[in-house]
Amino acid sequence: MPLSSYRMHRIYLAATMNYGLGSNDPEELAYYNKIIKEMDDMKKEPFKKGITLNWDNPEVIQK
C-alpha cells in the first residue's frame, strides 16, 4: 500500500527536523532514509555565491 500524502508529509517533517521516525514500517523507513540521503547529498554539493563575471570574453558582456 503506498504512503498517503499526509504520512509522507509527517515523515518529511521528521527527517528535516532531525527527529526519529518512531515506526518500523518498511515503506516509511525507506522514504525517511531517502529524504535523509537527499539532504546529505545537498550538504556535500558546493554552493556558488555571487555573480560570475566573464572577464576573458568581452563579446559576451556586450550582448
Image (tube, rainbow, N blue to C red):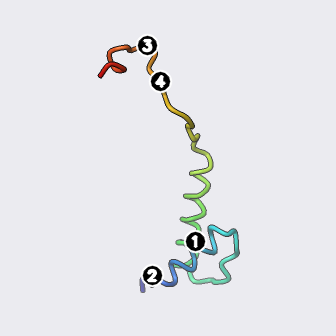
Q: Position of residue 31 (x, y in %)?
A: 53, 72
| Tag 2 near tag 4, CB within 8 Å | no
Of badges 4 and 1, the one in the foreground is: 4
Residue projecting furthest to the front: 62
User: Where is residue 43 shown, x and y percent of the image?
Assistant: 62, 50
Q: Is residue 40 above or below residue 16?
A: above
In the rendered image, which residue does mark 3 sit on?
A: 56
Q: Secondary structure at mark 1?
A: helix
- The residue lying at 70 percent from left, 73 percent from top is 19
Q: Which residue is mark 2?
A: 5
In the displayed structure, 42 sits above or below 11; it is above
Q: Residues within 10 Å of mark 3 (few under 14, many from 20)?
A: few
Q: Amino acid at mark 2?
A: Ser
Q: Amino acid at mark 3?
A: Asp
Distance (Cα) linking label 2 and label 3: 50 Å
Question: Depth-wise, is mark 3 or mark 1 nearer the camera?
Answer: 3
Q: Which mark is residue 32?
A: 1
- The first of marks 3 and 1 along the sequence is 1
Is 39 located above or below residue 2 in the figure?
Answer: above
Q: Earlier in the sequence, mark 2 or mark 4?
A: 2
- Along the polypeptide, which appears first: circle 2 or circle 3? 2
Helix, strand or loop status at disc 2: helix
